[in-house]
Amino acid sequence: DADVTQTPRNRITKTGKRIMLECSQTKGHDRMYWYRQDPGLGLRLIYYSFDVKDINKGEISDGYSVSRQAQAKFSLSLESAIPNQTALYFCATSVNSVYNEQFFGPGTRLTVL
Amino acid sequence: QKEVEQNSGPLSVPEGAIASLNCTYSDRGSQSFFWYRQYSGKSPELIMSIYSNGDKEDGRFTAQLNKASQYVSLLIRDSQPSDSATYLCAVTSSFGNEKLTFGTGTRLTIIP
């Protein structure tokens, strides 16, 4: 089984809809991250969490919210999806160490029409 | 100025040759440096980490770090068609290691 899983893997939705992307990990890592990837813009950090009680905004958090339900689960929500949120979304995890090696899930391809 | 810069490519290298990928960064206090490989439509895969000046070798891959010049490079020896991918450079911030800043990646094509 994969260490980091994301659901759904693909999603097509309409403008204004609420959507949730889920991430689960069996690596036992404390830190979890949500990124989006757009062609030409690279990976950009949306939110990150060090534990259930610690949530931090990344560089592009507007229009997104997150929930850390447990050490192993970190969800990303789009309250009212808009077309420019069409992107590839990745969850990542890392051990709480000075090195911060991050390991990525398989990604969710989201299309907002 | 971008924080982490990479030549977007594409970089074309004959099979069996050495592929050389470069990355420069602006934060002089960055402490950790990573190379990820990403196949089209797939997630980034960590292939090399380097934390101190000099070279680090792992199989066909060598990472080189020069903090004084603020660059990190990745050499791939005996390039194979399966090495064709986009390579992402990532660095931590001097303000703390909890976040990574990624370059936009270099697309590498190995020509059989």
Image (spheres, coloured by chain):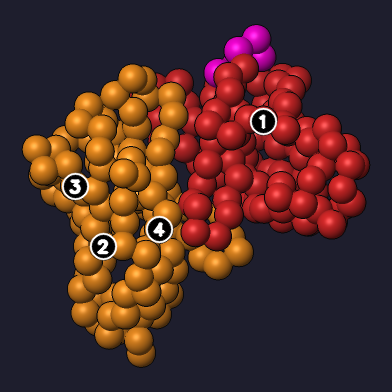
Chain colours: A red, B orange
Q: Is residue A99 visible?
A: no
* B24 in the magenta segment: no
Q: Amino acid at mark 1?
A: Asp
* Image location of residue A74, percent across then percent down: 70, 28
Residue placed most toward the observer, B10 or B46 = B10
- At label 3, counting other C-alpha atoms closer than 10 Å, the crowd grade (few under 14, some 14-19, many 20 or more) is some
Picture residue at 28% right of the left edge, 80% below the top: B13
Q: Residue B21's mark?
A: 2
* Disc 3 + disc 2, Cβ < 8 Å: no
Q: Amino acid at mark 3?
A: Tyr
Mark 2 and mark 4: Cα distance apart in space: 10 Å
Q: Is residue B27 visible?
A: yes
Q: Amino acid at mark 4?
A: Gly
* Image location of residue B34, percent across then percent down: 33, 44
Q: Chain of mark 4?
A: B
Q: Amino acid at mark 2?
A: Leu
Furthest residue toward top = A53
- Which residue carries the number 3 mark? B71
Drawn side of residue B32 relative to residue B56, left or right: right
